[in-house]
Image (cartoon, rainbow, N blue to C red):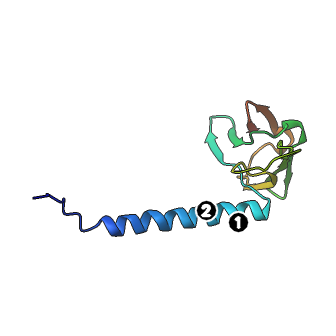
């Protein structure tokens, strides 16, 4: 006699996994089709400044536009593809390239004239005194 483990939810779990794969695949395709990406950001408050760290791997920090207009900090740039296909086929491309833009409302009292941005190891750190 064979013993078979009773797993009433296994079909539902498999269905959930398959649906997640489908939705995630569509989201990746949609991101690639839009040719845009949104870098992730962290904001820290220190005693004398705010520090905004933005993940921009593959982007030269010198090409990033950092500006303030009417109390809104805008950071914009572009990550270009480093894949050059001379022969063969690209089988998978998950690293999104294209333009990006992030906007942050600044609190009152910040010293807009002395905002500084420094890029290092794929992270742009903006200091807002």
User: Residue at (42%, 67%) from the top-left corner?
Assistant: 16
Image quarter in which the C terminus is found = top right
Q: Residue furthest front?
A: 1
Seen in the picture, residue 56 relative to 76 is either above or below; the reply is above
Q: Is residue 68 above or below residue 122?
A: below
Location of residue 22 in the rendering, given as x and y in whole percent from the top left corner:
55, 66
> What residue lies at 82% left-to-right and 36% top-to-bottom?
116
- Whether residue 22 sits left or right of residue 57 in the image: it is left
Observer-nearest residue: 19 or 4? 4
Q: CA distance from mark 2 to mark 1?
A: 9 Å
Q: Position of residue 67 (x, y in %)?
A: 86, 49
One can see residue 72 in this view: no
Return the residue nearer the eye: 80 or 25.
25
- Asked if residue 86 can be seen in this view, the reply is yes
Label 1 CA crowd tier, 10 Å (few <14, some 14–19, many 20+): few
- Look at 85% across and 37% down and name the residue there: 60
Residue 39 x %, y % = 71, 49
Looking at the rendered structure, the secondary structure element under dot 2 is helix
Residue 101 placement: quadrant: bottom right
Which numbered circle lies on residue 25?
2
Question: Which quarter shows the N terminus?
Answer: bottom left
Sequence-wise, which precedes: disc 2 or disc 1? 2
| Location of residue 118 (image quadrant) | top right
Mark 2 nearby-residue class (10 Å; few <14, some 14–19, many ≥20): few
Q: Which mark is residue 30?
A: 1
In the rendered image, residue 69, in percent from the top left (x then y), is placed at: 86, 56
């Amino acid at each position: 006699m064979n013993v078979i483990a009773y797993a009433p939810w296994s079909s539902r779990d498999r269905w959930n996994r398959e649906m997640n794969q489908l939705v995630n695949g569509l989201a990746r395709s949609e991101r690639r089709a839009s040719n845009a990406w949104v870098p992730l950001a962290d904001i820290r408050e220190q005693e004398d400044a705010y520090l905004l760290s933005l993940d921009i791997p593959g982007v030269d920090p010198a090409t990033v536009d950092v500006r303030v207009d009417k109390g809104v900090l805008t950071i914009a740039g572009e990550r270009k593809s480093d894949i050059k296909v001379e022969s063969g086929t690209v089988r998978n491309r998950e690293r999104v390239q294209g333009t990006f833009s992030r906007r942050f409302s600044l609190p009152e009292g910040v010293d807009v004239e002395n905002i500084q941005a420094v890029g290092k190891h794929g992270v742009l750190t903006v200091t807002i005194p």
